Amino acid sequence: MEYIYSVLILIGINIIMASSFNLIIGYGGLISIAHPIFFALAGYCSAIVSMKFGVPIPLAIVLGTLFSTVLSVALSLPSLRVSGDYLLIASIGFQLGFVEVIKNIEAAGAASGLTGIPALYSGPLRSPAFVVTILAVAALVVWLVHRMTHGDYGRAIQAMRDDEECFTSLGRNATAIKVAIFAVGSGVAGLAGALYAHYSQFLSPEQFGIIQSGLILTMVVVGGMGTTWGPVVGALLLTALPQAITFVNLPTAIMAPLQGMIYTGLVLLFLFVRPQGLMAKKVRQ
Amino acid sequence: MTLSLANVSARYGKLTALADVSLEVPAGARVAVFGHNGAGKTTLLKCAVGALPDMQGEVRFGGERVEPGAVYRNTRHGIGFVPQGHNVFKSLDVERNLTIAGLLHDAGYVSEVYSLFPILKDRRAQLAGSLSGGQQQMLALGMALMTQPKMLLLDEPMSGLAPVIVENVFESLVKINRSTGTAIVIVEQNVKATLPSVERAVILKAGRLVWDGSSDELAKKEDLWAWF
């Protein structure tokens, strides 16, 4: 049963990550690879303030989320004032740099990782409580992204992505909308990271590498970019698939590269055969 | 509201696009800006709306300073800007284009735009990208009108349109000017088609203002092309 709980928690975390990344890349058209870093920033922040300063865990989770949000604004504001391309370049630097910084900070456990993070829940109902919490947050995030991207604000986001010059000429501040989208998406990733830290009770810089960025992007591409349910389907599929493979008795030396090949193969397959993803939007003529 | 450009200059790297241009456009005027490719026409409009952060000189609209690098803020003060090529949201339908344009103003103004361009009402559920060039241009004008501007700056709105459509769009512009009092500054290449619809014309040559006078006077000039 514990295995089922852990898979459900992983699915919930991945739905949060894929939905928030979809807000940034799918709806906002902003290309960044630093999404897992905001997950990590909040995770480390929440873990450290609760461990070193005795901050209650729920408050630590809020602080971690805010920390990620503030840093995402610091990263995106100077980049997006110039051009969207700079965000990609800045995010690559941020992603690679942050992992190296963590590896050298003793208080964050350095390269060997941070252990002994207090758990949000304890006792015999710890795992089901986590499942309920994570899935509830995932549902809330899907709803939040849907609300943000539909209605007046959603249409403004779509218009901004469609033609930024036209959008600006109508008196709308495109930079403010892009920074807001990036901040909300990164803050939500931070919330997932903080929850994960107090579930797994262990964080290591290796968990937030460029591979993780690729995995989340695969979930969004396979599910369908710019759709509400695409990232949910993508997260479900790409979390369940590697778990299913583990039931096939293959040597460990083959298993890891096989998973990587499956992700890469899926992205290539979808880009060629169904670039709109599984949950494609209806195209009106 | 008067648009005033005082000693405005702009450069792209080492190239001078606009050199010490001063120009006043009073409320309700219809002014055409002519010149060859690279004469500085688009740069002039960009400076007027604050789209060039590094320009020199001063631009004022209705006495307020037009802030370089803050197009969205300047357009809120009543300058409607229709840039060339980037003027409709192609993946949205006609009505959504108009309502997005009016979000900061009065979205109910759509009916006024429809009465000015009835074809847009007929096509209101159609994607803007699938409209003909002339209809897209009408939509772009309609979107600019949704911001209820005091002055419309149009960058080559007739580019790529058939002559009959050009005539329709010019008629619409004059109608807008007369019915709402919105001043119009239009950058155009097609001098002969534009002159009957404006009262005043200015000519730019290599970034300098070389002629400023009434459109009738320019139309009568035997050596019209010598000015370009």
Image (cartoon, coloured by chain):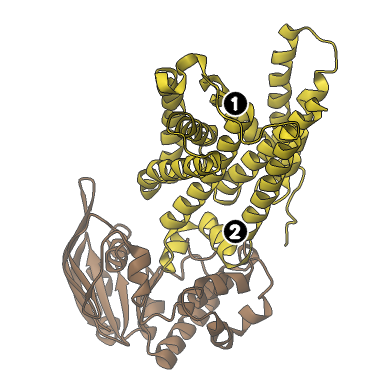
Chain colours: A yellow, B brown
* Residue at which label 2 appears: A148
Q: Please indicate, yes or no, whether residue B68 appears anywhere in the rendered image.
A: yes
Other residues around mark 1 within 10 Å, as few (<14) / some (14–19) / many (≥20): some
Marks 1/2: CA distance? 32 Å
Give how far across and how far down residue A114 sits, in percent. Answer: 51, 21
Task: Residue at 26% x, 56% y: name it.
Answer: B53
At label 1, which amino acid type do we have? Gln
* Residue at which label 1 appears: A201
Please identify the residue farthest to the bottom as the structure is shown.
B179
Under tag 1, what secondary structure? loop
Q: Please indicate, yes or no, whether residue A277 appears anywhere in the rendered image.
A: no
Q: For mark 1, name the chain.
A: A
Quadrant location, the N terminus of chain A: top right
In the rendered structure, the answer to whether residue B111 lies left or right of residue A46 reads right
Under tag 2, what secondary structure? helix
Task: Residue at 51% x, 77% y: name it.
Answer: B142
